[in-house]
Amino acid sequence: MKIISTFIICLFLICFISCHDEESYTPIVLNATIQDASEFGAKDGKIDLEVTGGIPPYTFLWSNNCIAEDLIDVSAGNYSVIVIDNEEHTVTDTFEILQPAPVKLTAIFQIIHPSETGAGDGSINVEIAGGYSPFTFLWSTGSNAQNLENLTADLYILVVNDSRGQSITDSIQLVDMVTDIDGNLYSIVKIGNQTWMGENLRVRHAPDGASIESYVYNNDTTNEQKYGRLYTWHVAMNGSNDEGAQGICPCRWHIPTDDEFKQLEMYLGMSQSAADLINTWRGSPVGTRLKKGGDSGYNAQMGGRMVYNGSFGYLGQWEYMWTSTEYSSNAAWRRCLANVYSSVGRYNSFTKNYGFSVRCIKDED
């Protein structure tokens, strides 16, 4: 009987103590002081964790596998933690470290196009704005250099990465180009042994910077880029009467002579006897080869003309091109192309005060 009483008393005490402990237990509470990353991609964020309640000591397991109470030198993101006290009570919470918006990575290009068809003297220089150094470069050529030199006309693709995971891709097209005094860029094309502009001239100043009189078809400036400007012969020659004069062409270029046009025509298939014909259409299908879409690369756009009285005509139908070869004091040789002809016209019948297109040819080295 005494044994039973003693057992009952012990059981009561155990229950009392246990119930008393449960009633006095304080749940684990987590509070955190967070220091955000100082800049985009920086690994200097901190989470200073404060734990109250529960039964110390505590153990910690963060989502990045850290087992310390606090996180230091971490990047922006969400971090979860499990805290376990000495009696294996647990609590879980998640905290976020923020970061400023990134400084956008940008590449600025300084481009020098090849000086002529087939030349390998182009270059691409790259300046980096924004982003975070160091930067890495990968060109479509396989080069890891920042800048490229000794380039031919082609498409070049660059991928730039910064140290914070930003990446940009840019493509740069180098083409055979020449620049006039106004900064206009013109494609160039090599046909046989000659190098021609691939577009009609649209310059508004002479090589010395003086303003010149020129015209855009129907006085509509939207026609200028495609068709170029129209010039009288004296303006095109910049006051010179010398065959092969530079005229208003860029340096190292000149107004083509009648013979240089013949050389072009004969290279494209015209016979010498046909090339020498006067005031007629000759040499089919050389005209087709010179027009837009033709296989010569000359790509005449059919810019029309301006008559001496100021009226315009034949845009998109005819192309008239001055030579630097005089026929008389009042007339000069010209070339004509027309949609209705597959041949090329060689004429001396119009006066020098007509407004025609100018297509420059490069000086021989």
Image (cartoon, helix red, strand yellow):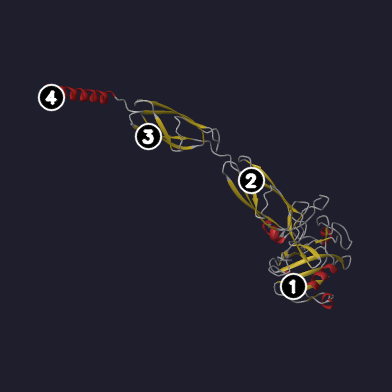
Looking at marks 1 and 3 on the same chain, the residue that comes earlier in the sequence is marked by 3
Residue 28 position (above or below residue 364): above
Q: Position of residue 187 (x, y in %)?
A: 73, 59
Residue 364 position (above or below residue 99): below
Q: Return the residue at label 4.
A: 4
Front-most of residues 56 and 52: 56
In contact (CB < 8 Å): disc 3 and disc 4: no
Circle 2: element type: strand
Q: Is residue 199 left or right of residue 333?
A: left
Calculate the distance from the C-alpha at mark 3 to the C-alpha at mark 2.
41 Å
Calculate the distance from the C-alpha at mark 1 to the C-alpha at mark 3.
83 Å
Q: Can residue 24 be seen?
A: yes
Q: Return the residue at label 2.
A: 136
Q: Return the residue at label 3.
A: 92
Front-most of residues 308 and 279: 279
Q: Position of residue 230 (x, y in %)?
A: 76, 60
In which image quadrant can residue 277 be found?
A: bottom right
Give the amino acid at mark 2.
Thr
Q: Mark 3, mark 4: which one is toward the viewer?
A: 4
Q: Mark 2, mark 4: which one is toward the viewer?
A: 4
Circle 3: element type: strand
Q: Return the residue at label 1.
A: 287
Question: Where is the C terminus found, in terms of image quarters?
Answer: bottom right
Crowding at dot 1, Cα within 10 Å, few <14 / some 14-19 / many 20+, comes out as many
Question: Where is the N terminus found, in terms of image quarters?
Answer: top left
Crowding at dot 4, Cα within 10 Å, few <14 / some 14-19 / many 20+, comes out as few
Calculate the distance from the C-alpha at mark 2 to the C-alpha at mark 1.
50 Å
Give the amino acid at mark 4.
Ile
Front-most of residues 208 and 120: 120
